[in-house]
Amino acid sequence: MKKVIITAALTGNIHVPSMSPYLPITPEQLINEAVRCENAGAAVVHIHARNPEDGKPTTSINIYKEILSGIKARTNLVITPTTGGTATMTPEERIAVVRELKPEMATFNAGSFNFALYPVINKIKEFKYPWEKAFLEATESFIFSNTFTSLKVFCKTMDEVQARPELEVYDVGQITNLAQIVGEGYLREPLYLQFVLGILGALPASVDHLIYLINTAKKTFREFQWSVCAAGRHQFPMGVVNMIMGGNMRVGLEDNLYISPGQLAKSSAEQVEKAIRFAKELGLEIASSNDAREMLSLKGLDKVNF
Ligand code: KMH
Ligand code: ZN
């Protein structure tokens, strides 16, 4: 029986600290959260770094190294750092975390699109840090750029360090992007797709959209595995349907700050526990991190550079 890989995305670079007191910011908080998520049954953690002083997303390789080596020292988790970078970074700068730290897996965003967060500004009563409001406002004119040129830069670097790309697909056209670079020999099957639903600027979260993405991928690729992550209240409905469809599930405070309507999650581990309860009720088995390594043909934690 296929086992289900549960990924925990711990903090992201979307939510600002004023949205939840439980959003982990410092390396220590992120490492402790990873330990909780492993104990709850997660196989993979997805990592963004933040400035420990004020929670502002950072691309500091030193802070990434501190977080990743701290998680490696206390868990056996597969660690997937982001290559999302920031609005002003070049592809080379965004992929530096992979070139330097040589992780087993890293994110790979499969196309360009508006990535807007500004509508949440009205929901935040008081901003804790001066950077937060401007950061959210800036997304009104933000295009998340992932051109074919930058996708190929990412492919080359991930190949060089044997990091598996976790292919973030936010819309159906990005499946065609991936097919194009597979066709040009930059990317090889079997692929690991992460369908990302509910981002303003890309595909809204709904069952028919999820099924449309899965079926389009089945028509396009011979061999792939997939997972889903969905923003906010869509996280569990999309995840459970996806597990029934034979896919995997991502949870975590990066994608959703709540454990149930109106109730903030105190930890991504609470969402991992809830996802595993659903999976078990569906009669599904949970993949350990070593199962995930086997299922995704990862190089192993002994071959990373942190
Ligand atoms: N933030 C999510 C919507 C990445 O980190 O590269 C998708 C994501 C992408 O996690
Ligand atoms: Zn991310």
Image (tube, rainbow, N blue to C red):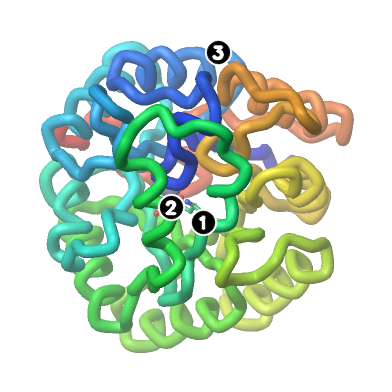
Question: Secondary structure under badge 1?
Answer: loop
- Side of 204 where 202 appears, left or right: left
Q: Name the amino acid, label 3.
A: Asn
The image position of residue 210, as x and y in percent, is 74, 65
Q: Which mark is residue 117?
A: 1
Does residue 225 appear in this view? no
Q: Which marked residue is nearer to the observer: mark 3 or mark 1?
A: 1
In primary-sequence order, the first of circles 3 and 1 is 3
C-alpha distance separating marks 3 and 2: 33 Å
Rendered-image quadrant of the N terminus: top right
C-alpha distance separating marks 1 and 2: 6 Å
Query: Which of the 4 image quadrants contains residue 217?
Result: bottom right
Does residue 173 appear in this view? yes
Question: Secondary structure under badge 2?
Answer: helix
Q: How many discs mark residues in the rendered view?
A: 3
Query: Which of the 4 image quadrants contains residue 127?
Result: top left
Q: Which residue is mark 2?
A: 136
